[in-house]
Amino acid sequence: SQKIEQNSEALNIQEGKTATLTCNYTNYSPAYLQWYRQDPGRGPVFLLLIRENEKEKRKERLKVTFDTTLKQSLFHITASQPADSATYLCALNTGGNKLTFGTGTQLKVEL
Amino acid sequence: EAGVTQFPSHSVIEKGQTVTLRCDPISGHDNLYWYRRVMGKEIKFLLHFVKESKQDESGMPNNRFLAERTGGTYSTLKVQPAELEDSGVYFCASSQDLRMISGYNEQFFGPGTRLTVL
């Protein structure tokens, strides 16, 4: 079956460290992959998009990689801060404009 | 600029009742989407409007769900009659059509409506 899996339900790291979140998918050949941030009581907020022909994309402290052979994307937050604590979702466009989301990883950055 | 708004923020109803959720997209966005997240599961696509037309309704779970977007502005999602398994958070999103420019449409999400069916 078609599935998008993200590593562990929760990830706790220390402030200043790099957080690395994983997104694995099966049975898709997406043209691009997106990462969203979701805070409690709010809707997902778009962060970054990476295309199938791109290996890496950066935006400030965020970095995304995309390996279409492994069917995997890695999402890195460098110099993490408590304000980065949130749930991070990866999503694929799986037909037209439809987004298919992963299960999400809850990140907690501790002082 | 106002973002996507949804009303109500929370609704508690009894099984068998009817509930109508409303979404106001960002002004000028022709694309409007409904998603939902049931407890412990991932966010799932329900349907996609382009203006007032249903472009893709492949995610609608059954005929108890009816979505409309008369006039191509705001949209409503009606659940009638509601069942226990309909409980969850219903998100609305909207986007411009930028596929010819960037190849994709960035979707802007509303805060969601939490529906509880007792």
Image (tube, rainbow, N blue to C red):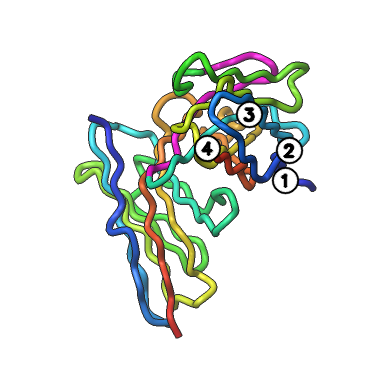
Mark 2 — residue?
A: B26
Q: Chain of mark 1?
A: B
Q: CA distance from mark 3 to mark 2?
A: 9 Å
| Residue range (magenta) | B41-56
What residue do we see at 48% from left, 69% from top?
Answer: A85
Q: CA distance from mark 4 to mark 1?
A: 31 Å
- The x, y position of residue B18, in whole percent, is 63, 24
- The x, y position of residue A1, in whole percent, is 23, 30
Mark 1 — residue?
A: B3
* Residue A71 visible in image: yes
Q: Are marks 4 and 3 on the same chain?
A: yes
Mark closer to the chain start, 4 or 3: 3
Mark closer to the chain start, 1 or 2: 1
- Location of the C terminus of chain A (image quadrant): bottom left
Foreground: A20 or B11?
A: B11
Q: Are marks 4 and 1 on the same chain?
A: yes
Disc 4 is placed on an element classified as loop
What residue do we see at 58% from left, 43% from top?
Answer: B114
Mark 4 — residue?
A: B118
